Every structure is written in C-alpha cells, then in structure tokens.
C-alpha cells in the first residue's frame, strides 16, 4: 500500500499511453487473457453505482472447517492457474491483514497514535488484536468470502525481542508477554487452522509505514541483500511444517530511493530481477512447496516533466522472466490504485506530483488495455513468462467517501478482474472506528470500535459492497486443471544462471565461463546468437536416466556425418540431450548433456539462425521474445537439441550459428 506512493510505468508503454490519451488506435497490449488462457479483450460495463445485472448478493460464508475441507496444501501453478495439492484450481480471494509491517509515519513520537497511519498504531502486529478476539476477526474474514490472507511483515519484526504492550492485545489476553514474531506465530496458526491460505509478504525493512523515501524502497534498503535472504529463510523454515502457509511474497513495491533506480536485469546491487531470482531459489531449496511471489518494479525515475519516470510493474517480464529450480512455483503480482497512474506517483501536489494521467482518468476500455499491458499479459498461455498474476493490492476509500472518479474506477477495475478470473487481494482488511463510530481508515473492509463492535462493508452504508460482492462471487474456473508444458529462459547476459538442483550441488562444470543449466525437469530447446540467452522446456520429455552428465568441449561425439560442414561442433553423446551450455564472452565453450532413460532417435536436421530467427511457426514461446534484438534458433517442441555449431571465421566470434535438432521419438 502507498502512503504518498512512488509508483509505476514503463517506457514501452509510452506509445500506447499517448494513443489512449489522444483517442487514436493502437493494438499493442490490447488483449487481456481470458479465463481459458486465450486472448480476449476485457471490457467493463454498467455504472459506478451497481452491477449492470442488478445488485450482487453477498458471498456465501464458509466456516473454518468448511474452508479447510475445500482444499489441500501446498499450492503450485499450472500455466496461469494456481492449484492445490489435488490439482484443483485455487483462486486467491484474499485480503491484506496489515499492521505487522509497521504503521509509524516516520515523524513525531512513535508512542503517539497521531504519528501512525490513520492514528492506528499496530505495534508490529496485525491490526485489531486490541479490539476484537482473533476468532471474531477470522469469522468476519469468512463472512467476506475470503479464502486466503496476505500477511505483511517487516524485517525489523523478525529481530524484535521486545514484548508487545498488554494494551495492544487487550482483546486477546493469551498474547500478553509475546514478541511481535510470537504474535505473528499465533495469528498464522489461527488462520491456517481456520482453513485460510497464508502468503507472507516482506513489506518493509523497518517498522515504518511505506511507501515513499522511507528506507524501505528496496529489499536491500537499510540492510544487505544477504540479511534479507537470511530473514526469508528464517521465516520459511519457521512455518515449513504448516502447508497452509503457501507462499513467500518477496518484497513490496520496489522503487527508487533518493539517488538510485531499481533495474531489471543489470545484475548490480539494485537489480530486482537478480535479487528475486536468488531469493526465490534459496527459498525453494529450503522448502520446495512454497509459492514464490514476485512483483515488478513499482517506480523508476524522477517524477518531473521532461525526465524519464514511470511504473513498469510486470512489463519487463515480457523479455526477461524468471526461471526457478522448481517449475510451477512462480506467481507474479501487481498493484493498482485509482489515484496513481502508469506514470503518476499519486502525489496530489508538491514534490512527486506530475500532470500524468491516473488510472481513474481512463475509460473502461483504456483501463483494461493498460492493466493488460502492465500485468495481465503474463497470463498468456505457452510463453516463457506464463504464470498466474495476483493483483495483491487494490482498494478504495469506502464509507463516507464521495470521490466519483474513484468509485467509477473501482467498478471498472473489479469488472476487469472478474472478466479475467484474476486472483486478488484487497487493501486493507482491518481498521478502527473512532469514538463517534466513524472509520479511521475508510479503506478498511472491517473496522472495530474500542469495545469490539464491527462496522463492515456488508453492514450497510458502504458503496463498495456491490463491487466487492460482484468480485468475490463472480463465476470462476474450478475443478481439475490439466498439467501444462513450461518454457523458461536462461539469462547468461552477465553471470551464471544455474537453476538445476542437480548441478548446483556439484562442482563447477566449466570453470572460468558463464554457465546456464535448465531446471532438472527440462531440456535445452533454443539458443540466441551473440547474447548468450537460452530457452528450456519440459514438453514431450525425455525423462532423464540416472548416471553422469557429460560436459562436451570438442567434436569427439560428432558421428553419423558432418551436419555443419566447416563449423566447430559440440555434440552430445548418443542417447543424451542438451540441458545446459557455457560461454566465454558470447562464444560457445561447452555443452552439458544429460542421459536419456530410453533410446533417442539419431536422425535429425540442422537449424541455422546465423542470418535471422529460425523458430517454429507454432509451439512454445513463439509469441514472445526471450532475446530481443538477437537472432534465435529454437527446435520444435517435438525435438531435442543434440548439438550446437559455431565458427570463428568471418568474424562470427564463436557464437552459436546452428542447432542439431533431433526428434524425441
């Protein structure tokens, strides 16, 4: 959530945004992913005051035992869908139970409630524990139709050994004397016992509310990357036995600090892409059952007219996506609020304020296009970036608000989520009411008085109820989701890219060279010329056999004829297939080959890509560019790579020029 937020947008969106504002036509990013994974344009209909088909009914509330019986952990992914342990679709119908990330605004006495967001000091705990018994709060969560909770926390909480004040847990005396982390333990245990899926969210470093220039801008603001990863491993191991703790949401709203922008793929200290890759794989080595949730970059640049600035979110994923050691564990996330925009921080005036349009300024059709461009395109089936997209924050001011633009925006935005069957988490769930009975934070879906009296979105007088009920009760895919193929990138632009659990446990197989290894369930299926990127897949097998993997550095295994006359060749032994490669600069150094469990065909074809792309017309990741600006060679999904050809002649520089593609059967 953003206080005075520094938010969003990518340079690639400028053309589309300009066309939207000028009323001209553009097709870029116009297609949102439909529930079946096909391309469809999301549109919003009806007015801001109610559904076009009538007032939606409140959600059906499940009891704790009913919710617990409806799904089994852990969760994983199949294409754009999240599924439970039985392979059944599990749609995240979630809310943010905020507080444990910190509520102090950074100015004034930390002990003064007025120095906390909305005057609600949380003492590094989920809000409301001083006002209502935990069981009552959870019952109200059930009444909202939720099945999952995003639970923000700070790194400071992990290390805080000071017991919380007794007054802060007055309605839950069993928590007296506990540290904030021990309170979080109790909250998580209660949530999961009541059937909720819990996704932990590293929201802040310090116990200060985000999200401006506050020391919480990046994962390594006010701490080292190593400390951040270590804290994540501590948290994952702490809750590892509870399979309803289903996910690690790595970091909230990564953004620029005073001097530096975050980036996506530069492999420096500010690289969100590399940091998330490292943390995600370390987490999966500790607990292979966890979902790994990654947001994009929430803000880059200086928000001044004439200077580059914006909110790329997931836009960079189109050309540089993540590959984890466990396929089927990656979820991408994005945040949307009416008062922000693709290049608007959300600041009303003064520093950070610009004239760039806000999301609430778009027509329903324009909003759908922008939301797709910044997030929902990731759900397109069969691409290297295909994954579920979780809108893990959105919301609006409710009871007492008369902001017509924000009302229209929420209606239009929830229509988009409904049309796309998108996983969601509203911000925030819990707040307080004051002595006069008014909500102190009217964004909260549930507000509690000092004596525990609830004022909720369903209790009348809150204009958001229709849109919430429409969203939480919308028709959605249910039941079994078939297994799907994966296509995943290897990025050797700057360093090693080892996502093989087998090879990461072994000594360096090509010393002095940059190496890329596919996940153990996948094989190499494509290479780019001159930038060292690769593409892996698990479609069609083959299954690996037990036994040593072969590092090929010369032509000793070139048999059955010269398939690239005059070129150097690295070829796998027969009945083995390429699963990795190494380069020096961008020149081929070695090929890594794994043995197949069954004999493989030895006939094949030479696929040249020295003068242009040579990729299948149909099949995996053909609709996306995993090495923009470079020629790519990609075998068909029914083939495996048996060899790579290259030359130092004609100034080719030893980069790959051809692949030996052989049929899988």
Image: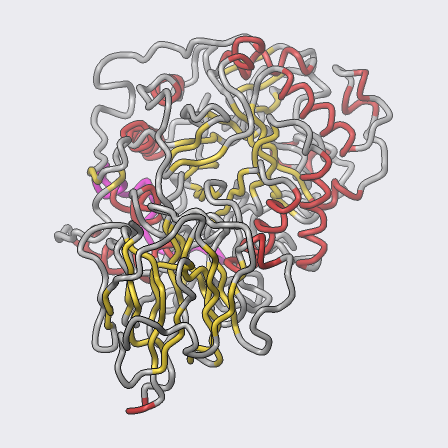
Residue at the far bottom in the pictured view: 650
Residue 121 position within the rendered picture, expressed as x and y whole percent measured from the top left: 70, 32
Residue 440 position within the rendered picture, expressed as x and y whole percent measured from the top left: 58, 26
> Seen in the image, is 556 located left or right of residue 433?
left
Q: What segment carries the magenta color?
A: 350-368
Residue 101 against residue 566 in the figure, above or below: above
Residue 125 position within the rendered picture, expressed as x and y whole percent measured from the top left: 71, 31
Does the magenta-highlighted stretch encompass residue 176? no
> Seen in the image, is 479 located left or right of residue 503?
left
Residue 502 against residue 424 in the figure, above or below: below
Front in this rendered view, residue 658 or 288: 658
Residue 8 seen from this side = no
Does the magenta-highlighted stretch encompass residue 355? yes
Residue at the far left in the pictured view: 25
Query: In the figure, residue 78 lies in which quadrant?
Result: top left
- All told, the count of numbered labels is 0
Residue 50 position within the rendered picture, expressed as x and y whole percent measured from the top left: 28, 18
Query: In the figure, residue 213 lies in which quadrant?
Result: bottom right
Residue 548 seen from this side = yes
> Seen in the image, is 408 located left or right of residue 513?
left
Front in this rendered view, residue 214 or 34: 34
Residue at 58% x, 64% y: name it: 258
Residue at 53% x, 70% y: name it: 495
Front in this rendered view, residue 201 or 352: 201
């Amino acid at each position: 959530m953003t206080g005075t937020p520094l938010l969003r947008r990518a340079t690639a969106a400028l053309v589309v945004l300009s066309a939207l504002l000028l009323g001209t036509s553009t097709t870029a990013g116009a297609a949102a992913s439909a529930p079946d994974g096909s391309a469809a344009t999301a549109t919003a209909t009806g007015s801001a005051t109610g559904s076009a088909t009538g007032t939606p009914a409140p959600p059906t509330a499940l009891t704790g035992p009913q919710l617990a019986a409806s799904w089994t952990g852990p969760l994983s992914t199949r294409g754009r869908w999240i599924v439970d342990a039985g392979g059944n679709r599990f749609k995240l119908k979630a809310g943010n139970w905020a507080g444990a990330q910190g509520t102090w605004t950074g100015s004034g006495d930390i002990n003064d409630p007025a120095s906390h967001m909305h005057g609600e000091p949380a003492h590094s705990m989920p809000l409301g524990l001083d006002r209502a018994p935990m069981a009552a709060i959870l019952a109200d969560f059930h009444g909202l139709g939720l099945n999952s909770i995003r639970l923000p926390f700070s790194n400071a909480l992990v290390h805080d050994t000071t017991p919380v004040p007794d007054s802060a847990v007055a309605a839950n005396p069993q928590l007296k004397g506990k540290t904030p982390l021990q309170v979080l333990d109790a909250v998580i245990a209660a949530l999961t016992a009541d059937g909720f899926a819990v996704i932990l969210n590293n929201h802040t470093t310090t116990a200060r509310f985000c999200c401006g220039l506050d020391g919480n801008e990046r994962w390594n603001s006010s701490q080292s990357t190593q400390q951040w990863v270590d804290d994540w491993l501590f948290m994952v191991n702490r809750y590892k036995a509870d399979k309803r703790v289903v996910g690690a949401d790595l970091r909230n709203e990564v953004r620029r600090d005073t001097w530096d922008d975050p980036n996506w793929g530069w492999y420096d200290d500010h690289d969100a892409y590399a940091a998330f890759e490292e943390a995600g794989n370390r987490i999966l080595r500790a607990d292979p059952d966890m979902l790994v949730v990654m947001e994009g970059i929430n803000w880059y640049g200086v928000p001044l007219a004439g200077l580059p600035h914006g909110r790329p979110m997931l836009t960079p994923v189109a050309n540089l996506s993540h590959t984890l050691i466990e396929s089927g564990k990656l979820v991408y996330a994005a945040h949307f609020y009416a008062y922000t925009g693709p290049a608007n921080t959300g600041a009303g005036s003064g520093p950070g304020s610009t004239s760039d349009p806000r999301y609430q300024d778009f027509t329903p059709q324009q909003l759908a296009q922008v939301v797709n461009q910044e997030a929902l395109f990731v759900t397109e089936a069969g691409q290297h970036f295909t994954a579920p997209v979780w809108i893990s924050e959105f919301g609006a001011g409710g009871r007492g608000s008369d902001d017509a633009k924000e009302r229209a925006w929420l209606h239009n935005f929830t229509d988009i989520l409904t049309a796309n069957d998108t996983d969601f988490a509203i911000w925030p769930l819990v707040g307080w009411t004051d002595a006069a009975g008014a909500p102190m934070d009217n964004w909260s879906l549930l507000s509690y008085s000092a004596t525990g009296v609830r004022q909720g979105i369903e209790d009348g007088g809150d204009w958001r109820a229709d849109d919430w009920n429409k969203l939480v009760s919308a028709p959605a895919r249910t039941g079994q989701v078939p297994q799907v193929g994966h296509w995943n990138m290897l990025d050797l632009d700057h360093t090693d890219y080892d996502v093989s659990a087998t090879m990461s446990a072994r000594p360096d197989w090509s010393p002095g060279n940059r190496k890329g290894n596919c996940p153990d369930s996948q094989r190499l299926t494509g290479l780019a010329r001159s930038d060292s990127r690769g593409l892996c897949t698990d479609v069609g097998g083959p299954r690996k056999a037990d036994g040593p993997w072969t590092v090929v550095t010369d032509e000793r295994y070139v048999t059955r004829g010269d398939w690239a006359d005059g070129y150097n060749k690295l070829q796998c032994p027969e009945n083995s297939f390429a699963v990795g490669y190494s380069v020096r600069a961008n020149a081929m150094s070695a090929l890594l080959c794994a043995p197949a469990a069954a004999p493989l065909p030895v006939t094949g074809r030479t696929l040249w890509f020295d003068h242009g792309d040579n990729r299948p017309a149909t099949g995996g990741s053909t609709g996306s560019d995993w090495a923009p600006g470079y020629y790519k060679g990609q075998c068909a999904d029914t083939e495996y790579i048996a060899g790579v050809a290259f030359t130092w002649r004609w100034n080719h520089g030893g980069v790959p020029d051809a692949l030996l593609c052989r049929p899988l059967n």
